Amino acid sequence: MNQYMSLLYENEAAYANLPPEAWGKIKQAHGSFAANVAKKGGKIVAGAAFQSSSTAKSFRAKRKTSGPFHATKEAACGYYLIEAPDPAAASAIAAICPAPHGGVEVRPILQL
C-alpha cells in the first residue's frame, strides 16, 4: 500500500476556549474517524495534534521566525499518516477526517 499524509488545517481561535465536553466530542469524532479508516480500505500509521502555531519555528532562506510563516486564519493543527491502496481511497479517507473549522490536505508520500 502507498502512504499519504493528511494535514489538518483549522482556525485555532475556534479551539481557544472550548469547555471540556466540547473537547470530548472532538476526541470522539477522531476516534470514530480512526474506526472508519479500515472501512475505506486504509490504515492509520501515525497521527498527532500539534501545539499552537505560536510555538512554531519556521526556517526559510536561512532565516528563523517565530510563529506561523505567514498570516492566515488556518494553521496546521495535526496530521494522520495513512496507508491506502490508491489516491482515490486516500481522498475518501481524508474526506471523512474531522476538521470542522478548516479542512484537510492529502498528499502522497514521495517514494525515493
Image: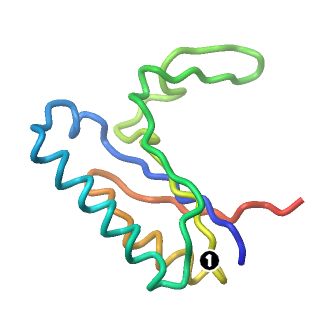
Rendering coords of residue 57 (x, y %): 57, 20
Rendering coords of residue 33 (x, y %): 36, 68
Rendering coords of residue 30 (x, y %): 33, 60
* 7 horizontally vs 51: left or right: right
Vertical comparison of 97 with 14: above or below: below
* 92 horizontally vs 35: left or right: right
Q: Nearer the viewer, residue 29 or 57?
A: 29
Task: Say what secondary structure mark 1 lies in.
Answer: strand
Badge 1 crowding class, 10 Å Cα cut-off, few under 14, some 14 to 19, many 20 or more, is many
Residue name at image x 38 percent, y 57 percent: 103
Residue that sits furthest to the right in the current view: 112
Q: Quadrant of the N terminus?
A: bottom right
Residue assigned mark 1: 84
Vertical comparison of 110 with 70: above or below: below
* 9 horizontally vs 25: left or right: right
Residue name at image x 66 percent, y 83 percent: 85
The colour scheme used here is rainbow
Q: In which quarter of the image is the C terminus?
A: bottom right
Residue name at image x 76 percent, y 22 percent: 61
Rendering coords of residue 56 (x, y %): 51, 23
Residue name at image x 33 percent, y 52 percent: 102
Name the amino acid, label 1: Ala
Q: How many numbered dots are placed on residues in this image?
A: 1
